[in-house]
Image (cartoon, rainbow, N blue to C red):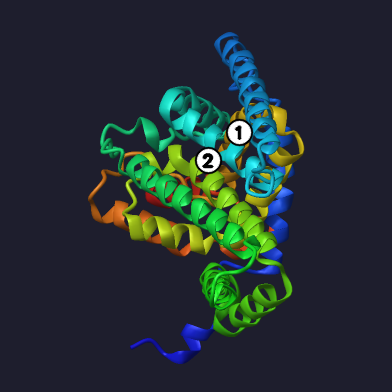
């Protein structure tokens, strides 16, 4: 049985410092992504133009459908925040169903360029990498759960707005939102912090506001899962190792993800196009917060297990948050020690 002190404490990966560092890395990575070639090769420019056109058509179509539904009395149900969340989900669905190879090309090209000054071959070229696409299946399952949760939020908002309200409606809605906020915030705030936040949000905010806010939280999380998909599809992590990997970097990923999500919401007509830009910047982020697989390490060996363990616990967390960590110089030091 786990000690109560560990149950009540927030995960070490979540902190104000790591959250701020994630925001800083988001802007730095976005700026650097525009200096790389992943987005601006001849084929990349054609794909960029096509994605931009699809993004415009997608968002304009959603606006037209929303106006039609609003004219027949569904304006309360199809409120603007829910439409913005729908746009993000459709953009993620477009990428995974139609453009995943191009999406991965942008990621790996950007990662190679971030590593270009080092004598290092990225691990996705290793002949023993995992090709089971388990990460794609995990993301697909999460995308389905995300749709179900957003539909449930719509149902709760509609039930709360019904007049007259159904018996015990508010009691049930209060309980659902309370436990939802508690589960969402517990890894970052710990037991007591998440209890306080859940009680505050579930009592002070209207159910419709809570439903919209929670949908945005899930939408932001879905976006981050999409951006990390090319990495996880080649890193050969188990499902639990993926969860531990993300929790160890929770603050950085949260700050980075919120920044990217806010930019997509701000420039919504180009949302799908911005996801491609975000993928290039995510590769640069991962060059900062991960240690590459050393050349010659075979998946399933003791050396590979050691690399996975270092990624899961994020041994260089403090150095990264201070901005002093260079993940690729680890292998230079290791190679120097081996030669001596």
Residue 288 lies, in percent from the top left, at: 59, 47
Where disc 2 sits, the SS reads helix
Residue 169 lies, with reference to residue 98, above or below; the image says below
- Residue most toward the bottom? 4
- Residue most toward the front? 164
Residue pointed to by mark 2: 227
The front one of 18 and 75 is: 75
| Residue drawn 38% across the image and 50% down it | 338
- Are there few (<14), some (14-19), or many (20+) residues within 10 Å of tag 1? many
Residue 304 lies, in percent from the top left, at: 31, 51
User: Image quadrant of residue 156?
Assistant: bottom right
Question: Relative to residue 23, is residue 117 drawn left or right?
Answer: left
| Residue drawn 59% across the image and 8% down it | 42
The reply to whether dot 1 and dot 2 touch (C-beta < 8 Å) is yes
Instruction: Give the Cα separation between the discs numbered 1 and 2.
Output: 8 Å
Residue 207 lies, in percent from the top left, at: 65, 65
Residue pointed to by mark 1: 275
Residue 203 lies, with reference to residue 331, above or below; the image says below
Q: Is residue 315 visible?
A: no
User: Image quadrant of residue 89?
Assistant: top right
- Residue most toward the right? 266
Q: Earlier in the sequence, mark 1 or mark 2?
A: 2
Where disc 1 sits, the SS reads helix
| Residue drawn 47% across the image and 84% down it | 7
């Amino acid at each position: 049985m786990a000690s109560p002190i560990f149950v009540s404490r927030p995960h070490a990966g979540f902190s104000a410092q790591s959250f701020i560092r994630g925001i800083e890395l988001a802007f730095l990575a976005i700026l650097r992504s525009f200096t790389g070639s992943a987005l601006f090769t001849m084929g990349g420019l054609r794909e960029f133009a096509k994605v931009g056109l699809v993004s415009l058509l997608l968002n304009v179509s959603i606006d037209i459908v929303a106006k039609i539904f609003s004219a027949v009395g569904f304006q309360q149900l199809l409120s603007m925040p829910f439409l913005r969340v729908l746009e993000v989900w459709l953009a993620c669905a477009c990428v995974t169903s139609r453009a995943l190879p191009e999406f991965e090309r942008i990621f790996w090209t950007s990662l190679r360029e971030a590593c270009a000054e080092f004598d290092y071959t990225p691990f996705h070229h290793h002949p023993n990498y995992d090709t089971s696409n388990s990460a794609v299946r995990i993301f697909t399952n999460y995308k389905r759960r995300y749709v179900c949760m957003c539909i449930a939020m719509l149902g709760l908002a509609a039930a709360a707005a019904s007049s007259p309200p159904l018996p015990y409606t508010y009691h049930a809605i209060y309980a659902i939102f309370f436990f939802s906020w508690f589960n969402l915030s517990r890894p970052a705030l710990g037991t007591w912090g998440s209890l306080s936040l859940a009680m505050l949000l579930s009592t002070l905010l209207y159910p419709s506001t809570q439903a919209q806010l929670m949908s945005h939280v899930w939408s932001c999380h879905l976006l981050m899962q999409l951006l990390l998909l090319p990495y996880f599809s080649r890193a050969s992590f188990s499902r639990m190792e993926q969860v531990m990997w993300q929790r160890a970097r929770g603050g950085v990923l949260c700050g980075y993800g919120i920044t990217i999500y806010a930019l997509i919401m701000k420039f919504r007509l180009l949302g799908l196009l911005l996801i491609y830009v975000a993928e290039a910047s995510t590769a640069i982020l991962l060059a900062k917060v991960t240690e590459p697989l050393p050349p010659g390490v075979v998946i399933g060996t003791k050396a590979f297990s050691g690399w996975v363990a270092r990624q899961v616990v994020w041994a260089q967390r403090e150095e990264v948050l201070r901005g002093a960590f260079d993940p690729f110089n680890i292998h230079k030091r290791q190679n120097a020690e081996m030669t001596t």
